[in-house]
Amino acid sequence: MYFQTLDDKSECVGIYKDGKLHFDNFPTDLKRTWRYSGSIKDDDIEYAWLYCQGRTLRDVCPPEFEKELNSSMKKMEAFFKSFQIAKLDMTQHCIFDLIPEDSLASFCEIKNKITEYVFAMNDKPENYDFLNDAHKLIYNIGEQELNIDTLDCKSLFTTTNNRLGLQKILKGSKYIDYNLFGTATGRLTTYPRSFPILTMKKDFRRIIKPHNDWFLSLDYNGAEVRTVLSLLGQPQPSEDIHAWNMANIFSSSEVSISRDDAKVMFFGWLYNPESEVIQSELYDRNSIIDQYYANGSVKTIFGREIEIDRRRALSYIVQSTTSDLVLERAVAISKMLDDKKSFVSHIIHDEIVIDLADEDKNIVPDIKAVFASNKLDTFKVNLSAGKNFYDLEELKL
C-alpha cells in the first residue's frame, strides 16, 4: 500500500515498496505516498503531504524516527552537494544512477514510515480533493520552463536599478515553484528559489514570452467585490462592478466620486471593520461573518478552515474564497486543455494566464465561459491577449 517514487522524470521512474526498489515492472496496489511527483498519476493515490497541510518530513517526524531520518537525510544532502560541486545537471541524469541503491532504499523506507504515521495521526482534510487537484496543477506549472527572451527589451536595461534587477532574474530559475500552503487564506506564494512571477516589477514582464503564439489572460472584474455579493446571495451585476457600486452604493454621497474612488472606498470598508462608509443593506458584513465564522475560526465554501479573530474574519473569508475560486477554475481550464497544444502558463492572484496556440483560438470563448462560471455564480471576466506578458490588450469576443 505505501510506496515512494525515486524520480519525477518520465524516463527515470523508480518505485520503492515493501523494502524493494523497482525500476521496470512496477508493483500494483500503490495507494499512499508522501507527495505527488508527476511520474505516477493514478487518481486513487493519496498523499500524506496534503494530509499534513504542506509540512516537511522533519516537521511531522515522530521522535522515534528522528535519528533514522536525520541520518538518511544527511547522506542524501551529501550526495547532492557533491553533484553541485561536480556541476552535474540533474535534469540529464537519473537519480538511481548516481546514488547507491542501499542509500536510496534507506531514505525511502524512513519516508514510508513517516508517511504511514501521518495517515494514522491525521484525518483526511475536508478540502482534500480540491487540494489534490490544485497541487497537481501547480506541480505541472513548475515543470514548464518559462520562455525568457530579452531581444526586444533593451529599453528595460537603461537604468542601473532595472539592469541589476533583470540580471538577477536572468541568472535565477526559469521555473515557477508555487507554494500551495504559503498563506493561511490559500493565496499562492512562491518558494525562495522560484522565478519571481508574483513579485517582479510589472514592466519586467515583457521578457516573458509564450512558447506557443499568444498569452491569453483571464481575470474577474472586481473579484473580491463579486465574492462578497455572491456570499450574500445577491445577483451579479453585468457591468463593471466598481461603476455599479458608484451608481448604486455611493450615489447618495454629497461629493461626486469617480470609479476609482468607489473602488478605494469599497476596499477600505472591506478591510477596516470600523469603516461605515457603506451603509447599504446590499453589503451586510455581519451576515457573512455569522454564516462562515464560529468558535474562533473561518470555514469557507471550499472547506478551508482558518483560525482568526472575528474582527478580521470578513477579509479572510473573502480573500480565501476568491483565491480558491480562481485556483479551482484554473484546474478546470487545465483539464479542458489536456488534449490541446495550449496550456495554463501561470496564475497571479485572480488572474489565469494561458499559453495559447493559434490552432486553439476557436476555444477561447469556451475557456472564458469555464472561467466565468464558478462555484458561487457567473462572474464578469476581463480578457486580454498579447505576444508577451506585459503588452496585453483587451480582447473582445
Image (spheres, grey):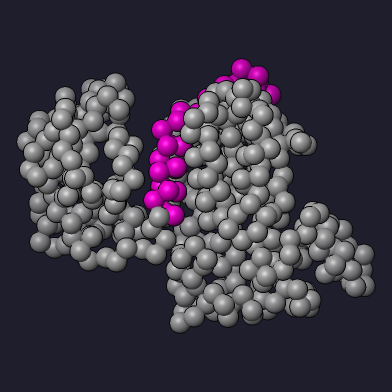
Q: Answer with the quarter of the image where residue 85 lies.
A: top left
Q: Answer with the quarter of the image where residue 54 lies.
A: bottom left
Instruction: State which region is magenta.
Output: 130-155
Question: In this orientation, does residue 81 appear?
Answer: no
As rendered, which of 370 and 213 lies closer to the eye? 370
Residue 371 coordinates in the image, percent (x, y): 62, 46
Q: Residue at x 46, y 37 (%)?
A: 141
Residue 282 coordinates in the image, percent (x, y): 75, 73
Q: Is residue 186 left or right of residue 1?
A: right
Q: Residue at x 9, y 32 (%)?
A: 101
Instruction: Check if residue 134 falls in the magenta segment.
Output: yes
Residue 37 coordinates in the image, percent (x, y): 31, 39
Give the total number of marks visible in the rendering: 0
Q: Is residue 108 left or right of residue 261?
A: left
Question: In this orientation, does residue 5 appear?
Answer: yes
Q: Residue at x 72, y 51 (%)?
A: 380
Q: Answer with the quarter of the image where residue 216 lies.
A: top right
Instruction: Look at the image and tell me in which quarter the C terminus lies.
Output: top right
Instruction: Check if residue 22 falls in the magenta segment.
Output: no
